[in-house]
Image: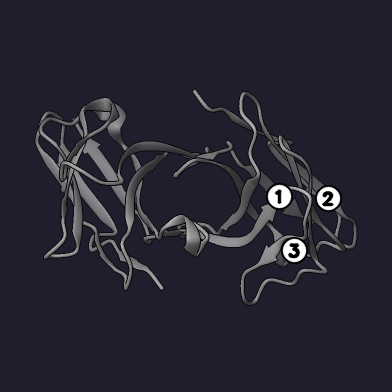
Amino acid sequence: AQSVTQLDSQVPVFEEAPVELRCNYSSSVSVYLFWYVQYPNQGLQLLLKYLSGSTLVKGINGFEAEFNKSQTSFHLRKPSVHISDTAEYFCAVSGPMEYGNKLVFGAGTILRVKS
Amino acid sequence: GAVVSQHPSRVICKSGTSVKIECRSLDFQATTMFWYRQFPKKSLMLMATSNEGSKATYEQGVEKDKFLINHASLTLSTLTVTSAHPEDSSFYICSARAHYEQYFGPGTRLTVT
């Protein structure tokens, strides 16, 4: 079984400052890792994903994440945030297709960008 | 890109009635769709996995007789909340799987009065 821990429930940050949203996972099998963003009363939008290959993954809206297998982490970063980045961010993990490819989500981190 | 729609976006119903929510993959075929429930200020909880042409697989603790799922075609899955009660009020989100990714619908806000 997989599990995901997002260490911060809320992260306040000033506009144009860098931000890191932390995510740790546990799994007994190889995993795929995802970050999603959710704006109020909307569904989830995929920011980026790690399936294999390069451990540094670049996504949309200037976000990137680094897969660290030894630390079982997949932290999300952005060098300079905008007011429009205010939203809730979910880290998720899934196992291989033969395990049903189900997504397990972390509890979410609310990013609040202040002017 | 892959687009998933949900209908309705919001629904208010009276206690004891049933509500059907539709999830459609608009530009791709999805043999597998997922239904999630999201409580206020909480993460998404997987309710069931919907496979085209077969019975849905429910997660532990989810009442299959209360949350009926039908995946009649490669582009449509429906979730029917039967005999709804106020505690069923929630945000329901579906997703459709394509390769290793899941594409999410915009969600349906259900309020049971």
Disc nearest the viewer among 3 and 1: 1
Question: What's under tag 3, amino acid-wise?
Answer: Pro
Farthest residue in the front direction? A98
Q: Amino acid at mark 1?
A: Leu
Q: From the viewer's perspective, is residue B28 above or below residue B49?
A: above
3 or 2: tag closer to the N-terminus:
2
Disc 1/disc 2 C-alpha distance (Å): 9 Å
Question: Dot 1 corresponds to which residue?
Answer: B110
x, y percent for residue A45: 43, 36
Pointer 1: residues within 10 angstroms few (<14), some, or many (20+)? many
**Relative to the observer, which residue lies in front, B107 or A35?**
A35
Apparent side of residue A78 relative to residue B4 in the rendered image (left or right): left
Mark 1 vs mark 2: in front = 2
Numbered disc 3: secondary structure: helix
Residue A36: percent from left, percent from top? 38, 43
Residue at image point 34% right, 53% down: A32
Neighbours of disc 3 within 10 Å: few (<14), some (14-19), many (20+): some
User: Which residue is rendered at x = 89% and y = 62% of the image?
Assistant: B16
The C terminus of chain B: image quadrant: bottom right
Mark 3 to mark 1 CA distance (whole Å): 9 Å
Q: Residue B72 falls in which quadrant of the image?
A: top right
Can residue A102 be seen in this snapshot? no
Give x and y (percent) for residue B60: 62, 76
Residue B91 located left or right of residue B20 = left
**Residue that carries the numbered disc 2 in the rendered image:** B19
Q: Are marks 1 and 2 in contact (CB under 8 Å)?
A: yes
**Secondary element at tag 2:** strand
Count of numbered labels shown in the rendering: 3
Q: Nearer the viewer, residue B53 or B65?
A: B53
Q: Would you say the residues marked 3 and 1 are in contact, meaning their CB atoms lie under 8 Å apart?
A: no
Please indicate, yes or no, whether residue B10 appears anywhere in the rendered image.
Answer: yes
Residue corresponding to mark 3: B86
